[in-house]
Image (cartoon, rainbow, N blue to C red):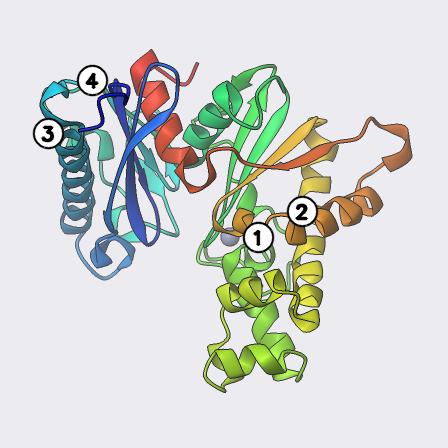
Amino acid sequence: VNEGRRAPVAFGVDIGGTKVLGVAVDHTDAVVGEARVGTPASAADPAGTVAGAAAAVADAVAEVVAALGHEAGAGADPASPVGVGVPGMLDRDGVLRFSPNLRGAVGADMRALVAARLPLSELLVENDANCAAVAEHRSGAARGADDAVVVTLGTGIGGGLIGAGRVVVGAHGFAGEIGHMLVDPSGPPCPCGRRGCWERFASGGGLGRLAREAAGAGRLGDVVTLAGGDPELVWGEHVTQAALSGDAGSLEVMDELAWWVALGLANLTAVLDVERFVIAGGLAEAGEILLGPTRRAFAELVEGSGARPRVEIVRAAYGERAGAAGAAMAARDGGLW
Ligand SMILES: [Zn+2]
């Protein structure tokens, strides 16, 4: 036991496409514990039963909360508030209405399912990207920016909107589905059922697609070797790693990705007059090799570039923990505000 460590006061869990990540936060918003399990395979399976998939996800959440409590030791309060971030369109009653990345659980009352497994805890269940926005706005890279967007570039793209200092949830709780802005109506199919959504181009999945195109055209020789010799086996992670070590072909692919990221940010700026974008999610790990070219492309793409104050594009402070940390903070403080 680390005697100097501060006591956790709330737990947060972020249900992702590949992992269920939990953190404990203290009263200063610092992350003081972490636990994770894999996302149940049934969560993404549209052929299984909703009840089975949703129960498996709720079980995973309870398992992560138990692990966080165990890690916190004897001093942990079993009734600590718990916040849960859910990917997709969650209505204000806690029912998952639409979710390309958690499609097996669509229709389930996620709030009731988790509450049944954590009967002692005060519980908050919210959209995952809204939770990430809470963390970054209160104590992270969006602090002090009352008109900001937290953009989570992961498998897909999540968005948390901050307007006039508050999280904007919309009329039904569905605001911030920025990954599904259409940017090319004849583009590649999206798990949401349409074509050419922004997240098909500017996410980790989009990077993989751009990378395989470049590999197929012979522009990524070293990376293809790294991936085992087959251009079809090149993933976004391979290109990110190679770009970080200076591979010229991979840096070109990152520039292409940055253009697509900037296109969406320019559209959001036209609607919302944003003062700062905070980039979170797995792709944020690429840092300046993505953010530098994104700033340059944004300056060319945004309306009235020379006539508006500079819009900041910065990396998230909480990294991949933003959703879980924000869920914990919101649970601790009784809501998103
Ligand atoms: Zn879509």
Q: Spatial distance from mark 1 to mark 4, Cα to Cα?
A: 36 Å
The mark closer to the camera, 3 or 4, is 4
The mark closer to the camera, 2 or 4, is 2
Q: On the image, numbered disc 3 is attached to which residue?
A: 116
Task: Report the side of 225 relative to 118 (left or right).
Answer: right
Rate crowding at label 4 as few (under 14), some (14 to 19) or many (20 or more) other CA atoms within 10 Å. Answer: some
Q: On the image, numbered disc 1 is attached to which residue?
A: 286
Instruction: Answer whether labels 1 and 3 touch (C-beta < 8 Å).
Output: no
The mark closer to the camera, 1 or 3, is 1
Q: Spatial distance from mark 2 to mark 3, Cα to Cα?
A: 42 Å
| Circle number at residue 291 | 2
Q: Identify the amino acid type marked 3.
A: Ala
In primary-sequence order, the first of circles 3 and 4 is 3
* Residue 147, placed above or below residue 18: above
In primary-sequence order, the first of circles 2 and 3 is 3
Q: Spatial distance from mark 3 to mark 4, Cα to Cα?
A: 12 Å
